[in-house]
Structure formats: structure tokens, C-alpha cells
Image: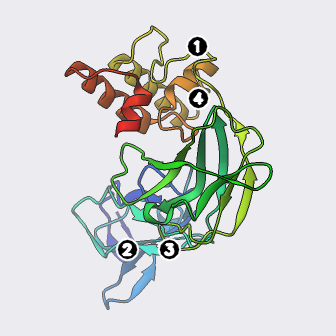
Amino acid sequence: MTGNGFELEYLIDPSGIAYEFLPSNPVEGAKAEIYYKDADGKEVLWNAIDFDQENPQITDSAGWFAWDVPEGEWQVRVSKDGYEDAASEWLNVLPVQTDVNLDMRSILTPGIAEATFVHGTATVRFTRHMLDESITADSIYLTDAEGNKISAVIKPVKESSNNTDSSIVYKLRTESDQLNGVSINVTPDAKSYAGIAAVKSALVLQEGTDTEEKNVVLGDVNLDGNVDASDASKVLEEYSNLSTGEASSFTEEQKIAGDVNFDGTTDSSDASIILAFYSFLSTGGSGTLEMYLDAA
């Protein structure tokens, strides 16, 4: 079969995802385009319509793009407002190119997405991953209703796949029993992984869910009183269902127990943390998952 001067051999590639900072953070709604080099070395936008495909494509909630292209030299380019453009290297097909994952660097100003407290601990989630070294007592701090600073120990909460110097969730632990009416304050000294300063802002903390009051053990997703590999399997099953568009099968208690990295979702990162904690217990460790995370 021929088309556009090519001798066609259909392949399931190139394919991959557009993501921001970590592959577990896909970018939805990005424009993905694929180019080829013609016989003269000119870069040409592929006319995919001739092959019953679309070019450009718009990435889905998983950041996914994929084409079936003939043999040749190809490049994938992705773009979206608020991000720097990203592109793959020029790829030879053959061989099959099925892991073309492109990191899209955000140029958006970071801010607070959510700020909650349980007893004397505040949990802050940013809209972007932040440089850990920029999150200090001067760049992010708590104040009471009169504007007085409240002393707190700041600690990043890492996703299991995150071994970088940036985090999206931070905990501020105080010696207070409650943080009702307390505000979280952010200054421009707080910077995203891309080095972009946050806007000075303040937000009143909202009361979060206390796992003890809910009689929920963090990590005990199947609610059998233990935290083990079966809980991780339960999380992965839920994540798989949600990824394919199915409705959640978790109760409210299971959602609380499963979100062990406190990022508002239950996914493979939570499963990895649960497995790591189970391994810790199996080799003589003791304590709760909260204690394990605090010591990490």
C-alpha cells in the first residue's frame, strides 16, 4: 500500500504521553503534532488524513498521543498555553517508538490549590511542584487571627515516584491542638520547579478529615485492620477502574485510607507507599503508616 510517496508498513508508533515534571502528572489538552523529513531533509507536518488518522491530536486525561506511521524519520511536538513547547528527538521508524514521553515545563505562576488542617498539622497542596529549598519558614508560614506567626516544622510529602528536589504537597506541624481560624501565607520566595515565584497570598485553612474520628487506619484500604499487600492491590484495582472511566467503587472511608500521600487522589503512588510500609513491617519495623511517613 502506498501514500504520499511512501511504501507503507503500518506500525503502532510513535506514541507516548505529555506530562509536567513527573510522568505521573499528565498534561491534558495539549496539542500533539508529528513531523517527518522528506527526501530533501525538509521538515513537513504529516498529512495524517490520508491514512485515516488525525494530526494534530489533543491529549486526553492520560496525556496520551499515538499514530501509526510508515518508516522514516519522525518528530513529535507538543504545545499548550502556559507551558513551554516540547519536542522529541528525530526518531527513526523502524525501530518501534512507543515510549515517546515529553516533559512540558510550566510557565504559570504557582499558588495554593488546597490548604487543610487536622488538629495541629496543616497540609498545603500547591498548583505546581515547588523547589523544596524555597519552601522555608520565610516563604510559607501560618498566622493566627491576629496576624501573629505560629511556629511550625515544614516537611515535603513526596510521591513514591518522586526522587527530585521538588514537591507539590507540604505539611506544617505545630505544637497547637487546633488550627481553627489560622491562615497559610505564601510569599514570592516560594518558587516552582521552573523557578517561577509565587504571588504573595494568604488563605484560611479548612478543616480536613481526621482518620481517627472516622475510625480509619491510613493505608488499611480493605478495612480489615491491617496494612499489607492486599491494600496496595485494592488501590491499584481502583486506579485501573478510574483510568478507564469507570465509577469509583471506594467508600468515603476507603478513599481516606487509600490517599496515603495526601494529594487528593488514590493511585499507583499510594500503592507503592503502602507496599514499602508493608515491607518495613515485614522486616521488623513497627508503628503506624503516619509514623513511617514522618520518619521518611
Residue 133, by quadrant, is bottom left
Which of the two labelled residues, at mark 4 and mark 3, occupies the earlier sequence position? 3
* Residue marked by disc 1: 215
Q: Quadrant of the C terminus?
A: top left
Q: In which quarter of the image is the N terminus?
A: bottom left
Left of 82 or right of it: where is 76?
Answer: left
Residue 242, image x and y in percent? Answer: 55, 33
Q: How far apart are marks 1 and 4 (CA)?
A: 27 Å
Query: For numbered disc 2, what is the local secondary structure?
Result: strand
Q: Which of 71 and 262 is in front in this view?
A: 262
User: Is the residue marked by circle 2 packed among few (<14), some (14-19), or many (20+) residues within 10 Å?
Assistant: many
Which of the two labelled residues, at mark 1 and mark 4, occupies the earlier sequence position? 1
Asked if 138 appears above or below 142 in the picture, the reply is below
Q: Which amino acid does label 2 sit on?
A: Gln
* Residue marked by disc 2: 75
Residue at left offset 40%, top offset 12% = 226
Query: For numbered disc 3, what is the local secondary structure?
Result: loop
* Residue marked by disc 3: 195
Residue at left offset 40%, top offset 22% = 288
User: Is the residue marked by circle 3 packed among few (<14), some (14-19), or many (20+) residues within 10 Å?
Assistant: some
Which of the two labelled residues, at mark 1 and mark 2, occupies the earlier sequence position? 2
Asked if 262 appears above or below 248 in the picture, the reply is below
Q: How far apart are marks 3 and 1 (CA)?
A: 41 Å
Proximity of marks 2 and 4: CB atoms separated by less than 8 Å: no
Q: What residue type is labelled 3?
A: Gly
* Residue marked by disc 4: 246
Q: What residue type is labelled 1?
A: Asn
Asked if 92 appears above or below 135 in the picture, the reply is below
Q: How far apart are marks 3 and 2 (CA)?
A: 28 Å
Q: Nearer the viewer, mark 2 or mark 4?
A: 4
Residue 148, image x and y in percent? Answer: 72, 54
Residue at left offset 41%, top offset 19% = 231
